[in-house]
């Protein structure tokens, strides 16, 4: 079994988030972190996962980083959110 990173990112791919562009959000995170889904970055900081419905569809597209929800994401805001976690290490 693969080791989990210090932070776990869960990008919602439920119906509402899918319609709102979750594929694009996962795509930009894969580029930014240089990992695929279910992989952990080489520095051990992040594990990227996809899930179905986080229960806050009104905020679609949504991702959770650890226990914090980030909603109404666009490619740039998703990238920015991850950079904050990188900075606070
Ligand atoms: S579909 Fe994404 S939070 Fe419900």
Image: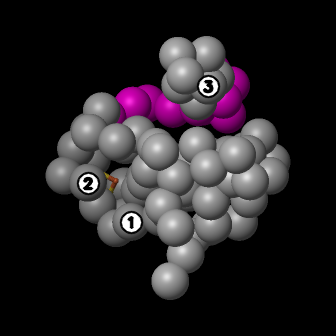
- Give the image location of residue 4, x and y in percent: 48, 61
The mark that comes first in sequence, 1 or 3, is 1
| Residue 17 visible in the shown view | yes
Quadrant of the rendered image holding ligand 1: bottom left
According to the image, label 1 marks what residue?
51
According to the image, label 2 marks what residue?
54
- Give the image location of residue 7, x and y in percent: 46, 43
Secondary structure type for disc 3:
helix
Q: Residues within 10 Å of mark 2 (few under 14, many from 20)?
A: some
Question: How far, Cα to Cα, is label 1 from label 3?
Answer: 22 Å
Q: Which mark is residue 71?
A: none
The mark that comes first in sequence, 3 or 2, is 2
Secondary structure type for disc 2:
loop
According to the image, label 3 marks what residue?
86
* Magenta-drawn stretch contains 49: no
Residue at (55% x, 22% y) in the render: 89
* Closer-to-camera residue (73/30): 30
């Amino acid at each position: 079994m693969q080791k989990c990173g210090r932070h776990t990112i869960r990008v919602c791919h439920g119906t509402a988030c899918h319609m709102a562009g979750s594929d694009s959000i996962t795509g930009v995170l894969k580029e930014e972190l240089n990992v695929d889904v279910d992989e952990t970055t080489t520095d051990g900081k992040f594990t990227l996962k996809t899930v179905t419905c986080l229960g806050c569809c009104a905020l679609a597209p949504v991702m959770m980083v650890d226990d914090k929800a980030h909603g109404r994401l666009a490619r740039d805001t998703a990238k920015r959110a991850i950079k904050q976690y990188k900075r606070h290490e």
